[in-house]
Amino acid sequence: MTSPDDAPRPLGRKAYGSIPHLPGSRTGPADKHLSLELARICTERLRDARDSVIVLEKLDGSCVAAARLGDEVIALGREGRLAAHSPNEARQLWSSWVSTHAERFKAVLQPGEWLVGEWLALAHGTRYALAHEPFVAFDLMRQGARLPWAELTSRVRAGGFTTPGVIHEGGPLNIDTAMALLPPGGFHHALDPVEGAVWRLERQDGAGVRVELLTKYVRRDKVDGSLLPENTGRPAIWNWRPAALPSKDVLP
């Protein structure tokens, strides 16, 4: 029998890679830090006027993707495998949600592109009193490359998708200021302290814009997966569940 780790990847790759941490961010054993030189560009001083920085609220859920292959939209996990084949209930809910909203994804995606975002249905380490649907799109990919933030936000309007709250756009922004600019509960109604923030460094390149890098800050006291049942021994906490399924243990 094929194990989930051996299952094929429809894109021939992972759907999304890891984002390096800024110095001072809490990291896990497999995490990496951004170099000090690049971190300073994001937080202290741009190289020149062609650079720009967008700082977004970092959300705490499961990284997922919806890819358009021909005229079909498929739901993927971060590792690039079909969410429908995952034993994880939250991933299976993601697959069903993508099927239900396939036409919305088609309005955004060209064949070969995929939309990446945070699936907030299940509380991992942060509970949310969601005022919007449980998917928040934060990257639009083409051939493995990120499209610029302005193109992402423009394109997702056709599907009516939510994007992360914007803390800042323009020059560099240090970590303390970024976290201080977050409203209580962030922009997505977190019931626990907001996990952190994500910096996007983009650069004018002729008539276009390219994404140079993403980096993130996670607060030092954050514990990954602190609310997951496999870590707590208690029932799962759901930020969202379909109306057709039992609603107990869903946040009001």
Image: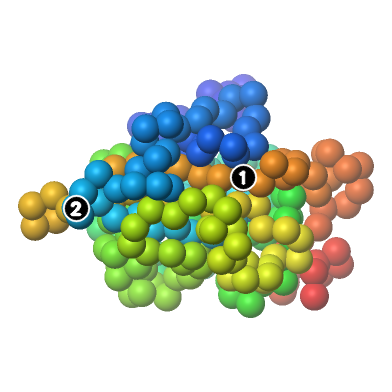
Towards the viewer: 222 or 59: 222
- The amino acid pointed to by label 1 is Val
Give the left or right position of residue 41, taking residue 2 as reference.
left
Q: Is residue 32 visible?
A: yes
**Which residue is denoted by mark 2 in the rendering?**
50
**Which residue is denoted by mark 1 in the rendering?**
218
Towards the viewer: 220 or 176: 176
Number of numbered labels in the structure image: 2
Give the left or right position of residue 206, taking residue 105 as reference.
left
- Within 10 Å of the Cα at label 1, are there few (<14), some (14-19), or many (20+) other Cα atoms? many
Tell me which residue sits at (53%, 35%) in the image. 23
Quadrant position of the C terminus in the picture: bottom right
- The amino acid pointed to by label 2 is Arg
* Residue 138 to residue 30: above or below: below
Name the spot of residue 14 as percent of width and height, x first: 43, 34
* Residue 60 to residue 16: above or below: below
Tell me which residue sits at (51%, 44%) in the image. 216
Give the left or right position of residue 95, taking residue 39 as reference.
right
Q: Secondary structure at mark 1?
A: strand
Tell me which residue sits at (38%, 53%) in the image. 172
Farthest residue, direction right: 233
* Residue 165 to residue 203: above or below: below
